[in-house]
Each structure stands twice: as structure tokens, then as C-alpha cells.
Amino acid sequence: MKIRINIALKKSVLDTQGKAIENSLVKNLGYSKISEVRQGKFIDLEIAENDHNQIKEIIDDICDKLLVNKIIEDYDFEILSK
Amino acid sequence: MKSVVITFPGSNCDRDAIDALQKINSKIQRIWHQETSLDNDLDLIIVPGGFSYGDYLRSGAMAKISPVMQEVKRLSNKGIRIIGICNGFQILTESGILPGVLVRNQKMKFICKQVNLRVENNYSSFTSKYKNRQIIKIPIAHMDGNYYAGGDTIKKLEDQELIAFRYVDQEGNLTDSSNPNGSMFNIAGIFNDKKNVLGMMPHPERAIDVNNGSSDGLLLFQSLMCA
């Protein structure tokens, strides 16, 4: 399975990069309708497993051990293709 | 005194740490991050500054799963003294040996300059040679030095006097303008519960000679020598 893990700063944590992007969009490019810009990251990977529960278990495990710092970040994942 | 300096791929302050240890005549072992066994009778482990693993993913995130960190964790629980400086501080928070996390500097810039720190607590083997509330000059050089932690953690750090250093102005006042990176409550360095682990963003090992701008960092290493 091809998986995409999306990682973003928690809403309660100031996202300085998102803020800088928002300022550029609004102030420099004039998109006054844009607000609440947040920047995150995604990690694509393949897992040789088809069972959804097993996949979730592996992803929770690797996010816990390495990919995500849960003090400041949240994550979710999507299955891109089989 | 027997000390270990760990080198990760991308560490670049390991040699400065060795220079500081030589000033206090410590025996020094250099350890590569793949090492799986450290001696039990160490007096000090230094997790040095730099850019371990290129700061990929998050600063310190990859280094926390380097084999040697299992040993660092084991020895931290045994009460061996450990100091994490800059990237070393980031590695110690990522590995859960110290609470909280270092996030991107508030103004999104790499900052390299000398700052004023206030010694918040000299009741530790790292800070005993300082006077309480002494103001010292130590350089910083980092992109991700903005200390962040949940409310409960901050309360615990305050209540149990586990804050080692704060960024201050020349008179020792906590001000926004003297806070270089946006750290909560101007926190520059913290201890663990037992005070055998210190993490700090400023570089005491770069402040051991007045000819390089300051020797205020030397007292930290001399404190460890007497402890």
C-alpha cells in the first residue's frame, strides 16, 4: 500500500512559517481573502501490508518513535493506492 | 574525572567540548554514535552541538534513535551527569530525557551572537561555582532554540526550580528584547528532576577563554570538576 502521512503543528502552537507565508500572500501579493495559513509536511511510504488495522498500527508506531513529536505536532494518514 | 563526548554525523561542537574538558584536566573518551556500550563509572557525558543528521525531520529527531542514546538514557537514570548543548539539548528533549521541545526561532532566523544569561539556580553540580542570579555572557548559535512546553511542564520546572538559565538584559531583567528566540519565559536551559541532566541552547564550551569574548562558560566545567 502507498501511504501518505500528514504532519502539522498543533493549532495551539504558533506556526511561524505559516505566519510568514500568510503575510507574504496577504501583504505582498494582495490576497486579502486569505487567512489561517498553516504549513505542514507529508511523508510518503509503501508498506507491504493490506490489512487496514495492521497498517494503522505500524504508522502509529513509527510516528510515535520517530516521525512525530506529539508535544507540538498532530498527524493523520491516507492510503494513496494499493 | 572521566568524561565522554559523543559525536553524531553532523556534530560540530565536539572538539570545542573537548577543549573545555582539557581545561579542567578531565580524561576524555570520544564516542561515535553507533556505540552500544558506555562505561558505568563516567563522571560526565557531553551531547554536543551541531546539526546531527542535517537537522532532517526535526532537530535532534534522528539522533535520538542512534544506538548510543539507549546508553545515554540508561546512564541518565543511574544519575550519571549529562549535559546537552544546543543540538545536544534538542536531542535530549527529543529522546524524552528532558521535557519540552525546541522549535523554530520566533523570527525564523539563525541567530549567532553573545547573550546575557541569568543563573537561575546554583544548587546543582553544573552551576555550583556561579553565584545565584549571576549574569554571564555566553554565545548562542541556533535556528531552533525556542523552548516550548505544556503548561503543566512549565509549572513543574518553576515549582521544582529546574530552570537553570534564562535570557536577560545586562541588568538581569527578563525582557522580550533580551529573549533572542521566543523561548517561553526566557528559558535558556533546564535540569531534569534529579538535576543530573542539564540541557541548554547557549554554548558554555565556546566561552572558556577571554580572548574569544568570554570565559564565563568555564565556571560550568569547573563546577563539574568539584562535584
Image: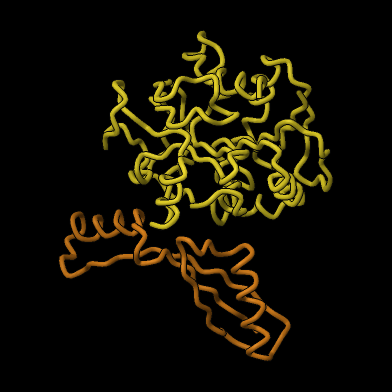
Question: Which colour is chain B painted?
Answer: yellow
The quarter of the image holding the C terminus of chain B is: top right
Q: Colour of chain A?
A: orange
- Residue found 68% across the figure and 21% down from its top: B21
Q: Residue B5: which quarter of the image? A: top right
Instruction: Identify whether B224 is placed above or below B38.
Output: above
Residue B174 falls in image quadrant? top left
User: On the picture, is A69 further left or further right than A38?
Assistant: right
Which quadrant would the N terminus of chain B be assigned to in this image? top right
Residue at the spot 49% in from the left edge and 51% down from the top edge = B101
Residue B213 is situated, as x and y percent measured from the top left of the image, at: 47, 14
**Image: B24 above or below B181:** above
Q: Residue at x 67, y 77 (%)?
A: A58
Relative to A71, is B122 above or below? above
Q: Is residue B154 above or below residue B86?
A: below
Q: Nearer the viewer, residue B115 or B123?
A: B123
Nearest the eye: B94 or A35: B94
Q: What is the x, y in percent for residue A49? A: 71, 85
The spot of residue B52 in percent (x, y) is 63, 44
